Image (tube, rainbow, N blue to C red):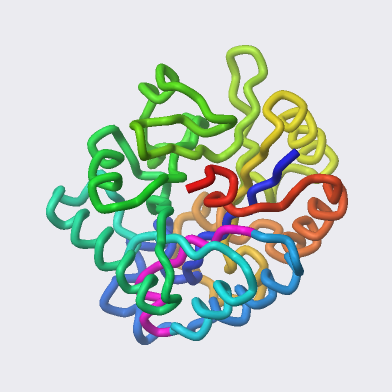
Amino acid sequence: MNILITIDVEDWFQVENFKPWISFSSWSSRELRVEANTRRLLDILGSRQATFFVLGWIAERLPGLVREIHDRGHEVASHGYNHNLCYNDTPETLMKDLTHSKKRLEDIIGASVVGYRAPSFSINGDVLKIIEDCGYAYDSSFNSFDMHGRYGKADFLFQKPRKGIAFKVSENFFELPVSNLSIGKHVFPLGGGAYFRVIPFPLFKWGVRKFLEQNKTYLLYMHPWEIDPEQPRVREAFLSYKFRHYTNLKKTASKLSALIENFNEASFISCQQYLGT
């Protein structure tokens, strides 16, 4: 069995839910908390390997953190540069974002960056083609849970050949979805994020076990700010957004440790290792 833990390296003020109240121009004046939180995640992981999708904006300010992720044996992948939703960008703007963030990360670690994750899973068929054209070997942005308005649509993937849990989009390009559990006609959101924080751990653990029985590989996503209950509050945000962002932040680190402990018989590997790219 394989478990792929994936971390979207962004800070508390860069999330999509808070964009109406936090402008991009104000980012440089905000408190950076991502470095300490990411190092805490690295310590929780220990010798287990994971994939870190790093925002280019963060990489430019904290190149030492990116090098540390790489030096500790993890895969460094791209999360774009400034967390724009991919399907809202023009093809030219998206291509610039993808190539700039990729090159920036490669310059820092001195190695190829082959993976990408779109902010808020904002992909479609056209976006995937641009990602491939920018030199990436895989994308990890398909979320089959369709009760979230921002998640992109890529249902055509179900017609593609499979390699384990990955879809082979073309000869040299894969889509590696987050892991949701299908129960009849319903999709149980098992991939991580707020669902990992909100769903009681015994139920979440059962779902992961069930997914592994069916697929042999499970992929989880999370963010460094999800283990940071002391982060600044965006009090003017909508109540539903605050619920998604702040619920159970105090429990996330211990839940991650419990997940690792309960599935210690599995191999914890990076996306790149899993795909053999």
Who's the residue at 35% across and 33% down the image? 171
| Picture coordinates of residue 99, whole percent (x, y) | 25, 62
Quarter containing the N terminus: top right
| Picture coordinates of residue 22, whole percent (x, y) | 35, 70
| Picture coordinates of residue 275, whole percent (x, y) | 53, 43
User: Residue lying furthest top in this view?
Assistant: 184
Is 126 drawn above or below residue 92 in the view shown? above
Q: Quadrant of residue 17?
A: bottom left
* Count of residue discs: 0
Who's the residue at 64% across and 44% down the image? 195
Q: Who is closer to the viewer here, 177 or 227? A: 177
Q: Who is closer to the viewer here, 140 or 9? A: 140
Taking 75 as reference, is 264 left or right? right
Magenta region includes residue 181? no
Who's the residue at 14% across and 50% down the image? 90
Taking 104 as reference, is 225 left or right? right
Who's the residue at 62% across and 81% down the image? 36
Magenta region includes residue 55? yes
Specify the segment rendered in magenta. 50-61
Taking 45 as reference, is 16 left or right? left
| Picture coordinates of residue 105, whole percent (x, y) | 38, 71
Q: Who is closer to the viewer here, 269 or 146? A: 269
